[in-house]
């Protein structure tokens, strides 16, 4: 199932409107002191309906408001975050960061 559709289903199951999510994102952004956490209605619609992939701050916002694990959200977008450090061991630092 597409991540945007899953997010919409979670939002609807929680009984939240786009406006509710936007309002909550403004509150989160104020708490964090960073406007990057704001999730505007148009962006949320693009994420849910047009396959737009949210950035890190927007993913965090969605996880907080929807009470989801960020790791789960990353998996929905096929990013195996929990494997990052283990996978990183297969790339020697000298090859990825030449001096």
Image: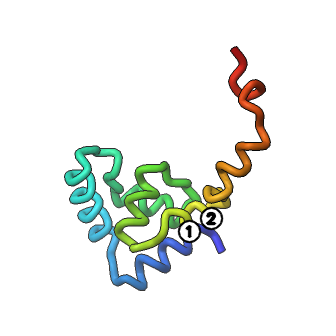
**Residue 97 in the figure: left or right of residue 63:** right
Asked if the residue under mark 2 is in contact with the one under mark 1, i.e. CB atoms within 8 Å, the reply is yes
- Image disc number at residue 44: none
Q: Say above or below: 97 vs 57.
A: above
| Image quadrant where residue 67 sits | bottom left
Residue 90 horizontal/vertical position (percent) = 79, 42
**Secondary structure found at label 2:** helix
Q: In this figure, which residue is indicated by the disc labeled 2? A: 75
Q: Nearer the viewer, residue 8 or 73?
A: 73
Which type of secondary structure does the marked residue at label 1 adopt? helix
Q: What residue sits 48% from the left and 58% below the top? A: 46
Judge the density around disc 2: few (<14), some (14-19), many (≥20) Cα neighbours within 10 Å.
some
Q: How is the image coloured?
A: rainbow
Residue 56 image point, x, y percent:
47, 50
Q: Is residue 15 above or below residue 34?
A: below
Where 22 sits versus 93, above or below?
below
For mark 1, what is the residue? Answer: 72
């Amino acid at each position: 199932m597409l991540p945007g559709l899953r997010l919409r289903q979670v939002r609807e199951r929680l009984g939240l409107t786009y406006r509710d999510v936007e309002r909550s994102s403004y509150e989160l952004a104020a708490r964090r002191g960073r406007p990057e956490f704001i999730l505007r209605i148009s962006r949320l619609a693009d994420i849910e309906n047009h396959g737009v992939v949210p950035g890190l701050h927007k993913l965090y916002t969605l996880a907080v408001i929807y009470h989801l694990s960020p790791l789960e959200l990353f998996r929905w977008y096929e990013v195996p975050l929990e494997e990052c450090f283990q996978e990183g061991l297969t790339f020697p630092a000298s090859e990825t960061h030449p001096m």
